[in-house]
Image (cartoon, helix red, strand yellow):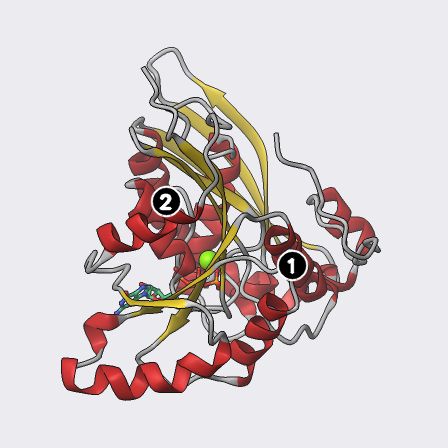
């Protein structure tokens, strides 16, 4: 029985790269559905995290970190994030409050302030676990001007500090209404899409410098065997021959490491045994290759929006 006060709506999780948006999404829905890594630009697609309780349903939209793009992939990432903001009922603006605000935080704030109509904003001062109590008010004062009207809350996506209060605030922002998704659905991605991201997450973990950002993962086969185990074959695309050598490593050692980490993560996510078969291919300069980006579902050129139109691609 649902009381008439059941609330449901979309909350966009916005912020510059590496502040902890995906970590927070996983913590809030209570399950690892989004790739997380210590390197910026881990998330490349909008991804839903759906939390349903007796109070209501929050559909979180994880977004790629908004940043200054240096290639077409970067432009596409920013566009993914901007569309999520335009479609949301409220914004969860995540910052790394263990550091002072950066120009990229300011850029995200500008996008939020420019939203028409304006949306309610909760500013999550994340990584509270790294900030001693006596330094918090000084740090908070640096972030306050970014979105002065926002409610502010110290949280830690890593330790779970204050996440129940955060949920209270977010539920309060949502309109009353029926749920958008079944109560047992936690994301809109299929297991194979999450697997592709977990493989990329493993590459981000093991590789250094620009190399992991030059990787795109395509799942070629995802077959369930009678035993219940999954057989997954995937291709890692890199941009240059030299990167192919780095990803494979001496006698295949690096690819093996990436494969082992990814396999464990996919097993934990899917709850089944996984056989993972990885190969590496060069696709020259794919981050600036519109045809290739389209194959991966990116729309490199921002679509023109009519002023004031509220887009309606909610289910
Ligand atoms: N100490 C601490 N680290 C955190 C916290 N939240 C996230 N992290 C770490 O911050 C790093 C980035 O986390 P992500 O969740 O991938 O960040 P993101 O904002 O999704 O990054 P992009 O997808 O690149 O935009 C990871 O190493 C996380 O473990 C936190 O509350 N405390
Ligand atoms: Mg992310």
Query: Ligand 1 sits in which quadrant?
Result: bottom left
Name the one closer to the observer, 111 or 148.
Answer: 148
Q: Is mark 1 within 8 Å of ligand 1?
A: no
Above or below, 224 against 310 in this view is: above
Q: Could one spot residue 257 in this view of the protein? A: no
User: Where's residue 183, x and y in %?
Assistant: 38, 24
Give the image quarter of residue 263. top left
Position of 315 with respect to 125 (left or right) is right
**Nearest to the observer: residue 98 or residue 73:** 98
Q: Where is the C terminus found, in terms of image quarters? A: top right
Q: Report if residue 86 is visible in the image.
A: yes
Residue designated by label 1:
82
Q: Quadrant of residue 130?
A: bottom left
Which residue lies at the image location 49% right of the left edge and 68% below the top edge?
A: 17
Q: Which residue is mark 2?
A: 171
Crowd tier of the residue under label 1, counting other residues whose Cα lies within 10 Å: few below 14, some 14–19, many 20 or above: many
Q: What secondary structure is marked by label 1?
A: helix
Earlier along the polypeptide chain: callout 1 or callout 2?
1
Say which residue appears at 16% left-offset and 81% top-offset. 132
Residue 148 at x, y percent in the picture: 47, 76
Q: Is residue 69 above or below residue 283?
A: below
Element type where label 2 sits in the image: helix
The residue drawn where x is 36% and y is 22% is 229
Q: CA distance from mark 1 to mark 2?
A: 22 Å
**Label 2 crowd (10 A; few <14 / some 14-19 / many >=20):** many
For this orientation, the residue located farthest to the left is 133
In this rendering, the label closer to the viewer, 1 or 2: 2
Q: Nearer the viewer, residue 9 or 214?
A: 9
């Amino acid at each position: 029985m649902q009381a008439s006060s059941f609330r449901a709506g979309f909350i966009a999780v916005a912020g510059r790269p590496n502040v902890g948006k995906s970590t927070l999404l996983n913590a809030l829905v209570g399950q690892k559905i989004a790739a997380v890594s210590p390197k910026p630009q881990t998330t490349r697609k909008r991804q839903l995290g759906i939390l349903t309780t007796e109070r209501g349903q929050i559909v979180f939209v994880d977004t790629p970190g908004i940043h200054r793009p240096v290639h077409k992939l970067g432009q596409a990432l920013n566009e993914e994030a901007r569309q999520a903001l335009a479609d949301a009922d409220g914004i969860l603006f995540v910052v790394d409050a263990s550091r002072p605000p950066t120009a990229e935080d300011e850029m995200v704030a500008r996008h939020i302030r420019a939203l028409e109509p304006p949306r309610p904003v909760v500013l999550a001062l994340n990584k509270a676990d790294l900030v001693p109590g006596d330094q918090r008010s000084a740090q908070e004062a640096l972030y306050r001007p970014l979105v002065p009207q926002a409610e502010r809350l110290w949280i830690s996506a890593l330790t779970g500090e204050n996440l129940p209060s955060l949920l209270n605030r977010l539920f309060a922002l949502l309109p009353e209404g029926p749920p958008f998704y079944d109560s047992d659905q936690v994301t809109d991605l299929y297991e194979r899409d999450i697997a592709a991201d977990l493989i990329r997450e493993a590459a981000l973990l093991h590789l250094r410098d620009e190399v992991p950002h030059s990787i795109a993962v395509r799942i070629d086969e995802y077959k369930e065997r009678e035993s219940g185990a999954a057989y997954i074959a995937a291709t890692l695309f890199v941009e240059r021959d030299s990167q192919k050598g780095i990803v494979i490593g001496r006698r295949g050692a690096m690819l093996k490491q990436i494969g082992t980490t990814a396999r464990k993560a996919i097993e934990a996510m899917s709850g089944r045994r996984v056989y993972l078969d990885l190969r590496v291919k060069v696709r020259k300069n794919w981050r600036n290759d519109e045809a290739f980006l389209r194959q991966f579902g990116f729309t490199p050129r921002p679509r023109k929006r009519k002023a004031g139109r509220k887009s309606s691609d909610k289910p």
